[in-house]
Amino acid sequence: MRVLDAFAIELPSWGFANTGTRFGKFIQAGAATTTAEKLADAGEVHRVTGCCPSVAVHVLWDFPNGAAAVDTVKADAARNGVAIGAINPNVFQDQCYKHGSLGNPDPEVRRAALSHILDSIEIQRRTGSRDLSLWFADGTNFPGSGSVRARKNWFREGLAAVHAALSGDQRMLVEYKPFEPAFYATDIADWGMSYILSKSVGSRAKVLVDTGHHYQAQNIEQIVAWLLDEDMLGGFHFNDRRYADDDLTLGSIDPYQVFRIFHEICYFTWEKGQAPDIAYMVDQSHNLKNKIEEMIQTALTAQELFLKAALVDHPALAEHQKKTNLIDAEECLKRAFFADVQPVLVEWRKSHGLPADPMAAFRESGYLSRVEKERAERNRQSVASYA
Ligand code: AFD
Ligand code: MN
Ligand code: MN
């Protein structure tokens, strides 16, 4: 049960607002239309699950007027029983970033990107957030478009300036992604590039593993184990994928892979006698499922798989690995993965005054029909503006 007390999952503010694919945007009448509404929805997820105490925010989307809104956003979060978590700068939407941000060949654009990130650090300071979550869409689409090495060094320069601006317990998490929106060479494309850049700028920089940001064949849990062993794993962006960065619900495609990732963390914790300091964050923004229900589903799945991973008999596994008892070693994992942990989860919820069935509790609360009535017109207008 202790393992559940220490397993907090951070929700993404952007997961509660209407988003779309590049082919269309299908509006949900009850989707959040303001930062306050996103925080209310996140608060509802935390109210029924008890495991989502913080919300990651996106600077341009949640602080359209910059740091001036910080006190209001903090108050809105507190009123809904959640705290502001990771701060996500946005250096991928403005027109000036067409050819990149910190990796742009134009020093003026690199300066603009750095300035936005430094403004985000001011917000990070004001919200009291530990993590600055950095994802860059930077890259090129064709061979010859840019110098790979020049862009690498521009990133090193920019990220060093970001690192120098951090203070207190602040960290910067450098996320990698193999492709999209760049389709020839993404500047921070894999864990090695993120590792090298993070290592080169200083100890506050760590690698952020987005579970959807890997090629099909990649062994994500092996990457996680290496980063753990190097004390370079800053945290996760949780989602699942069938083909690419599909941002599907965590565990909806391959729950055993999520379990194996969590197993590496639990095995490390057993061996070292202390849990690593990792930010467990969701990065999903669904168009088809109801947004709040999908976040509840994600949080419950993460809790369930983490609890299963904690059940692995580590002493027995270590013994079997020493003796290459392959079947017995594998069975240590499979026995835990197939264990039914629902009774323990229900017990944990009851001991924390939470509903035994969070999804049913949310559906019975009437919250969704209330916010659909309140927000329908604004969301309808947004699709009119989008069309
Ligand atoms: C997109 C990117 C990346 C980033 C997220 C939030 O692929 O995962 O972390 O948006 O900005 O999913
Ligand atoms: Mn991500
Ligand atoms: Mn992504």
Image (tube, rainbow, N blue to C red):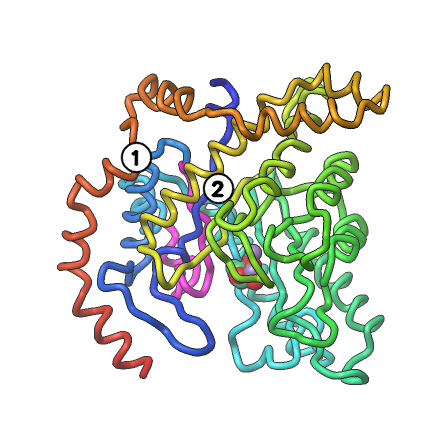
User: How far across and how far down the image is residue 85, in percent?
Assistant: 47, 44
Q: Give the residue drawn at x 32%, y 71%.
A: 26
- Specify whether 283 is left or right of 218: left
Whether label 1 lies within 8 Å of ligand 2 gets the answer no
Along the line of sight, the residue nearer the viewer: 378 or 249: 249
Q: Is residue 287 depicted above or below 196 in this figure?
A: below
Give the residue number, with chain letter if any, for mark 1: 358
Q: Is residue 145 depicted above or below 348 in this figure?
A: below
| Bounds of the magenta segment | 52-71
Q: Give the residue drawn at x 66%, y 61%.
A: 177
User: How far across and how far down the image is residue 190, in percent?
Assistant: 73, 58
Give the residue number, with chain letter if any, for mark 2: 128
- Specify whether 283 is left or right of 183: left
Q: Give the residue drawn at x 29%, y 53%.
A: 36
Which callout, 2 or 1, points at the residue further toward the start of the chain?
A: 2
- Asked whether residue 119 appears in the rendered view, the answer is no
Q: Nearer the viewer, mark 2 or mark 1?
A: 1
